[in-house]
Image (cartoon, rainbow, N blue to C red):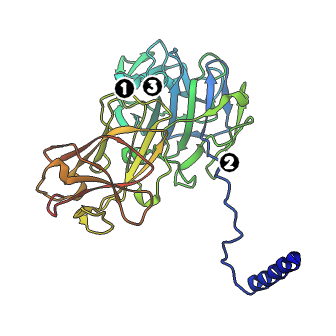
Amino acid sequence: MRYYITFFLLFIIENLLAQITLPTFHGIQKPDPPIPFVNYALSFDGVNDHINTGGTTISSNWSAEVWFKKSAQKNVHNFTNKSFSNAGSNNWSLRLGQWQNTKKIGISKYGYADFYINNSSANTDVGKWEHVAWTYSGTNLKVYVNGEFIGSFYHEYSNGPANTSNISNAKLMTKYIGYNSSATIHGEIDEVRFWNDKRTASEIADNMFIELNGDEAGLVAYYKMTNGTGTTLTDNSSNSYNGTLKNMNNNDWVTSYAPIGNLNNDYRNSIKAIWAKTSTSQYSLSSNGLFFKIDAALTEQNFVVFGNNNLSSTSTSNLPVGVAVRSKRIWHLYESGTVETNVIFDISDVTGNNATVGAASNYKLLYRSGTSGDFSVAATANSVSGDNITFSTVSLNDGYYCIGVTQNNGL
């Protein structure tokens, strides 16, 4: 009898459920977590490793860029070249380390002379990612390291005068990356870009920490090192100068920690970064009023890329309880690994206002994970110096930051 009652009740419940419209989410399963995206670089062992891109020779106006992590000091780190022999005075080579033990960034004209910048910034550090760019127009060759111009005055040896500021008829030869002898690169490279125009200082600084779309005007070849395996290096521009790896294999594809960030398009103004190249107790460059100071050296997998929305003045929207006003300028931070740093705002640069600066405890570091919604208080300021507000030893997160204050005239 108990069996029949149970069956009858189940029959009634089943029919009732059939007449009820269930929520549309009732059958959705929780998706698996996303597979982490891995950035790749190519590692050169210093002997014979090279890439044949089949690329072109660019005369008159050109630029070249690369992220480079040097593995060892050596006489020559040959970045680009036309052929594997001294094929006469028309053969030029860009060098990440120059000949005759200078170890400085330079350019060589075979059979004529080697040039380098006589500047300590032109000698990249071992074991640290650094961005190097060459630009050329007419007779004017400039070099930028980590977005900073380090000089166009080259010391010349071999043939010709002792010093010169002009280099005539220099060519960018993109057929080979590296070299087939001990003159090849010894280290890792990422984000290689070749252009048929002279990039400006702002174009270099504004784009060195982010990936390009690949269809930018003047972009001849672009190697993001996305393959991760095999002996083909894809050209991520629209020109299909795909490279072939020589004397290299899958072991030469390595994880890249070059400080490249994925920033929201609306926050790509004054893009800066703090990474292992930033020395202990040193400041990052300012992104329109926000900069960082680290007290402990970063390892390469820990870095932050940041840019802002380029707005001025203040806002009273999306505020947490207790905050009266915030900056309209918001910064998007892209973090890799873990970074703890001092966060510093220059109020006059941030808002454009001549604010009445109050006590440090009035100022709040505001954070939200997305582009909309209310902010929360991430930290209270620790000190004020002039109109610089410092938040000490903040553990940063991916997301969006601005500065708020508890008094209306504090920003």
Tell me the SS state at disc 1. Answer: helix
Q: Which image quarter: residue 91?
A: top right
Q: Residue at x 30, y 29 (%)?
A: 281
Instruction: State the separation of the CA atoms marked 2 and 1.
Output: 34 Å
Q: In the displayed structure, would residue 367 be above or below residue 66?
A: below
Q: Residue furthest toward the top?
A: 100
The residue singled out by tag 3 in the image is 105
- The percent coordinates of residue 47 (x first, y second) are 65, 17
| Left-right relation of 342 to 410 | right
Q: Nearer the viewer, residue 284 or 231?
A: 284
Q: Nearer the viewer, mark 2 or mark 1?
A: 1
Q: Nearer the viewer, mark 3 or mark 1?
A: 1
Q: Nearer the viewer, residue 100 or 71?
A: 71
Q: Nearer the viewer, residue 58 or 229?
A: 229
- The percent coordinates of residue 46 (x first, y second) are 61, 19
The residue singled out by tag 2 in the image is 240
Quarter of the image containing the C terminus? bottom left
The residue singled out by tag 1 in the image is 121
| Left-right relation of 279 to 357 | right
Q: Nearer the viewer, residue 353 or 15?
A: 15
Q: Residue furthest toward the bottom?
A: 19
Q: In the displayed structure, would residue 404 be above or below residue 286?
A: below
**Three-letter amino acid code of the residue under disc 1:** Ser
Quarter of the image containing the N terminus? bottom right
Which mark sits nearer the N-terminus, 2 or 3?
A: 3
